[in-house]
Amino acid sequence: VNSSISVGHALVVELLITFELVFTVFATCDSKRNDLKGSTSL
């Protein structure tokens, strides 16, 4: 762990990455979208 990165900075980065992951999963699993074809997991 780099000593120049504070716990607050690490928390912010973790929150942003988690938001992106959740947003991507929700966008992919939306049943109203017609532009996605094939396997949802891919």
Image (spheres, helix red, strand yellow):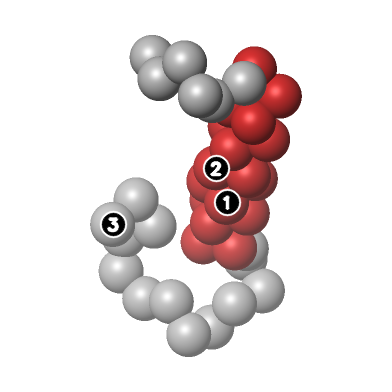
Tag of residue 29: none
Question: Are the residues tagged 3 and 2 within 8 Å (C-beta)?
Answer: no
What's under tag 3, amino acid-wise? Leu
How many residues crowd mark 1 within 10 Å: few (<14), some (14–19), many (20+)?
Answer: few
Residue in the image at 51% along x and 24% along y: 4
Q: Nearer the viewer, residue 24 or 6?
A: 6
Q: Amino acid at mark 1?
A: Glu
Kind of residue indicated by mark 2: Ile
Judge whether residue 11 can be spotted in this image.
no
Quickly name the residue at label 1. 20
- Residue at 64% across, 31% down: 9
In the picture provided, is 42 more to the left or to the right than 2? left
* The N terminus: image quadrant: top left
Q: Which SS class for mark 3?
A: loop
Q: SS at mark 2? A: helix
Vertical comparison of 10 with 12: above or below: above
Which labelled disc corresponds to residue 42? 3
Mark 3: few/some/many CA within 10 Å (<14, 14-19, 20+):
few
Q: Which mark, by number, is residue 17?
A: 2
Q: CA distance from mark 1 to mark 3?
A: 16 Å
**Residue depicted at 48% across the width and 85% down the height:** 35
The numbered mark, 3 or 2, whose residue comes first in the sequence reads 2
Residue 14 % position (x, y) = 58, 32
Q: Position of residue 28 (x, y in %)?
A: 51, 61
Location of residue 31 with respect to 22 vertically, above or below: below
**Left of 21 or right of it: where is 26?**
right
Pair 3/2: label in front: 2
| Residue density around tag 2, few if under 14, some if 14–19, many if 20 or more, within 10 Å | few
Q: CA distance from mark 3 to mark 2?
A: 19 Å
Q: Circles 1 and 2: CB distance less than 8 Å?
A: yes
In what quadrant of the picture does the C terminus appear? bottom left
